[in-house]
Image (tube, rainbow, N blue to C red):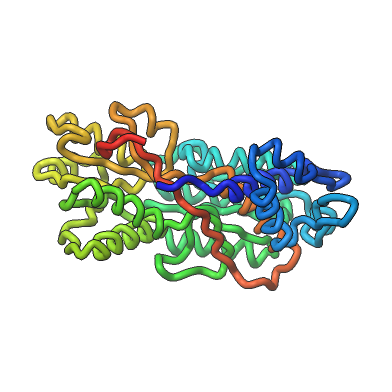
């Protein structure tokens, strides 16, 4: 897959530094000549990156003085409370959210905000206790009058839709801004009226399957757990679109939903395996690879496998995993800026802020980067 354009890389790095408060208190940024040397890029490339930031009202270029970060209404000085909350069920058990949470904490510190972490410990077999713990965290955020909450809704619960809506509405009725991380409250393709920050999951599913099709796979299956988040539905929709764009028929059993550790489900998957498997995430992909190998099937010789997220696990499995990367640092930066804008102007329409997914090619698909 094509690499990121240089001007986008520069713009992204500078955006991260702006949000983290690197150029405070003067707001002065490096000169174009300094940026050219730093990024080893041409002056027009650096200029294009700066123009994007200027169009986003993040910087201003003063003739004869230089480039400065704008002091806009979304700065912390005008926000009443300097406390934000992080509500992620099962936080500490999901690597992707641990990374995003860590990045959010760093950005919050840079902007002189406190970040309260909540979401419960390791999930138990009793889903009601998990929900109860997250509800308690939600109430603590309300009691402490935080300004806003970053919320990653529940998944893999039979009653998750009702639970997620109740939590989000409790926060909203308390006057607390809510920014959703990774997944929506509503089933794809519907949208809730809360800000949402994540990757373009439709595009993610498309590029994963497009890659497998280019390698000659034709009997594909998308493996997921029941009651998965709307992000997975979007990935499935993108995967289907990639198949149709090739003029191929979608297999009747394309979506295989079940508990991957369940013996019956595992047997059905490996008895007559497809030649290409798209797993809903890297953790599922790792289990799939293990099941296939136990059955005496080679990856990628007999079955090509692709996942999503690009966790550390992706490079530690027996066959390094081809996967679609989640840009965790950028998600955190965009989410924090969305929160500041929401706090500054609660009347702005709800937005979907989708970052571009990127395919990371490793051995599990049978090709190499």
Q: Does residue 157 appear in this view?
A: no
Q: Is residue 325 left or right of residue 224?
A: right
Q: Residue at x 62, y 53 (%)?
A: 334
User: x, y percentage for residue 87?
Assistant: 57, 49
Quarter of the image with the C terminus is: top left
> 126 or 303, which lies in front?
303
Q: Residue at x 54, y 53 (%)?
A: 181
Q: Does residue 77 appear in this view?
A: yes
Q: Residue at x 21, y 51 (%)?
A: 221
User: x, y percentage for residue 189?
Assistant: 41, 68
User: x, y percentage for residue 59?
Assistant: 77, 55
User: x, y percentage for residue 296?
Assistant: 12, 30
> 362 or 199, which lies in front?
362
Q: Residue at x 14, y 41 (%)?
A: 270
Query: Is 80 placed above or below 89 here?
Result: below
Q: Is residue 325 left or right of residue 260?
A: right
Query: Is 21 placed above or below 51 here?
Result: above
Q: Quadrant of residue 260?
A: top left
Q: Is residue 212 left or right of residue 275?
A: right
């Amino acid at each position: 897959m094509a690499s990121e354009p240089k001007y986008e890389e520069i713009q992204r790095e500078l955006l991260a530094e702006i949000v983290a408060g690197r150029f405070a208190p003067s707001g002065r940024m490096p000169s174009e000549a300094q940026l050219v040397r730093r990024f080893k890029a041409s002056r027009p490339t650096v200029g294009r990156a700066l123009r994007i930031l200027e169009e986003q009202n993040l910087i201003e270029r003063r003739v004869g003085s230089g480039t400065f970060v704008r002091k806009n209404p979304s700065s912390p000085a005008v926000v009443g409370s300097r406390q934000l909350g992080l509500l992620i069920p099962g936080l500490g058990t999901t690597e992707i959210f641990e990374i995003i949470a860590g990045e959010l904490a760093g950005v919050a510190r840079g902007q002189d905000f406190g970040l309260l972490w909540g979401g419960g410990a390791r999930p138990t077999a009793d889903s009601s206790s998990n929900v109860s713990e997250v509800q308690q965290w939600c109430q603590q955020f309300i009691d402490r009058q935080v300004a806003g909450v970053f919320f990653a809704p529940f998944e893999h619960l039979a009653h998750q839709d009702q639970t997620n809506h109740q939590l989000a509405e409790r926060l909203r009725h308390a006057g607390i801004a809510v920014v959703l991380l990774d997944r929506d409250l509503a089933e794809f393709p519907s949208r809730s009226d809360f800000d949402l920050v994540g990757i373009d999951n439709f595009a993610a599913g498309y590029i994963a399957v497009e890659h497998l099709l280019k390698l000659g796979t034709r009997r594909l299956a998308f493996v997921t757990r029941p009651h998965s988040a709307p992000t997975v539905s979007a990935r499935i929709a993108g995967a289907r679109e990639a198949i149709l764009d090739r003029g191929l028929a979608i297999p009747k059993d394309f979506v295989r939903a079940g508990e991957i550790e369940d013996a019956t489900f595992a047997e059905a998957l490996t008895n007559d395996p497809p030649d290409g498997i798209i797993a809903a995430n890297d953790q599922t992909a790792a289990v799939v690879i293990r099941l296939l190998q136990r059955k005496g099937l080679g990856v990628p010789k007999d079955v090509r496998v692709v996942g999503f997220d690009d966790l550390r696990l992706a490079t530690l499995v027996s066959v390094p995993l081809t996967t679609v990367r989640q840009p965790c640092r950028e998600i955190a930066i965009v989410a924090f800026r969305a929160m500041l804008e929401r706090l500054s102007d609660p009347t702005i329409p709800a937005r979907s802020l989708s970052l571009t997914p990127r395919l990371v090619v490793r051995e599990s698909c049978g090709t190499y980067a």
